[in-house]
Amino acid sequence: GNSVTQMEGPVTLSEEAFLTINCTYTATGYPSLFWYVQYPGEGLQLLLKATKADDKGSNKGFEATYRKETTSFHLEKGSVQVSDSAVYFCALSDSDSWGKLQFGAGTQVVVTP
Amino acid sequence: SAVISQKPSRDICQRGTSLTIQCQVDSQVTMMFWYRQQPGQSLTLIATANQGSEATYESGFVIDKFPISRPNLTFSTLTVSNMSPEDSSIYLCSVGPTHTEAFFGQGTRLTVV
């Protein structure tokens, strides 16, 4: 079956540091890949997505590239801010699943001034 | 895109009672999904709700505990029955018009006392 594995947190960084959150997946077919963000006390927001191999999703300075050869979708940001402190979820949607998502465990990111 | 309204946004309930959560979408969608997010955990799919048929439940979730209705293509309800403190979670409704998109409601934060 499908699965998503992402690095455990919490990840603690200083402001302006480089952030990487690793995400690898197992899936049949041709999944779409997503990163969602959940700020403290808030709902789930789509951060970025990629729907086919070699696609790069980007938003708010975050980027992730769909790597089929390594089954990965790592999230990166070059210079984090305190406001980026949140929990980040990697997820996939299989091609026949009509939007049903399989989530990773989530990675808490804490950015300090 | 799809806009999802979920009600209530939060509630505190007595153990042994039931709560019905409503999910309204601003467009017609084939499938709607209900997820549970336990404190500090990732999202777990409870069930898939199709219009005009019984919901499909994931392993570990049963209809008697989480009955779901899907009377039309824009609306669904999830009931959490005979609640215990272990049911304290965020419950989220989601729709996926295609496998490349997934939209979430703001969630219902449930506390059972």
Image: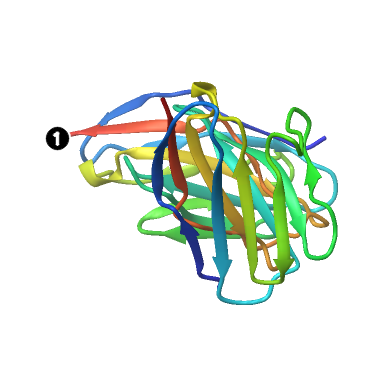
- Pick the residue in front: A40 or A89: A40
**Residue B11 coordinates in the image, percent (x, y):** 40, 42
Q: As drawn, which residue projects farthest toward the left?
A: A113
Helix, strand, or loop for circle 1?
loop
**A48 left or right of B63 in image:** left
On the rendered image, what quadrant is the N terminus of chain B found in? bottom right
Q: Quadrant of residue B96?
A: bottom right
**Residue B88 coordinates in the image, percent (x, y):** 48, 30
**Residue at the spot 28% in from the left edge and 43% down from the top edge:** A80
Report in which chain the residue with disc 1 lies.
Answer: A
- Pick the residue in front: A43 or B65: B65
**Residue at the spot 49% in from the left edge and 56% down from the top edge:** A46
**Residue at the spot 30% in from the left edge and 44% down from the top edge:** A84
**Residue A63 coordinates in the image, percent (x, y):** 46, 52
**Residue A44 coordinates in the image, percent (x, y):** 46, 50
| A30, above or below B83, in the image | below
**A99 left or right of A60 in image:** right
- Pick the residue in front: B3 or A59: B3
Sort mark 1 into few (<14), some (14-19) or many (20+) by Cα contacts within 10 Å: few
**Residue at the spot 35% in from the left edge and 39% down from the top edge:** A86
* Amino acid bearing label 1: Pro
Q: Is residue A74 visible?
A: no
Q: Which residue is mark 1?
A: A113
| A89, above or below B25, in the image | above
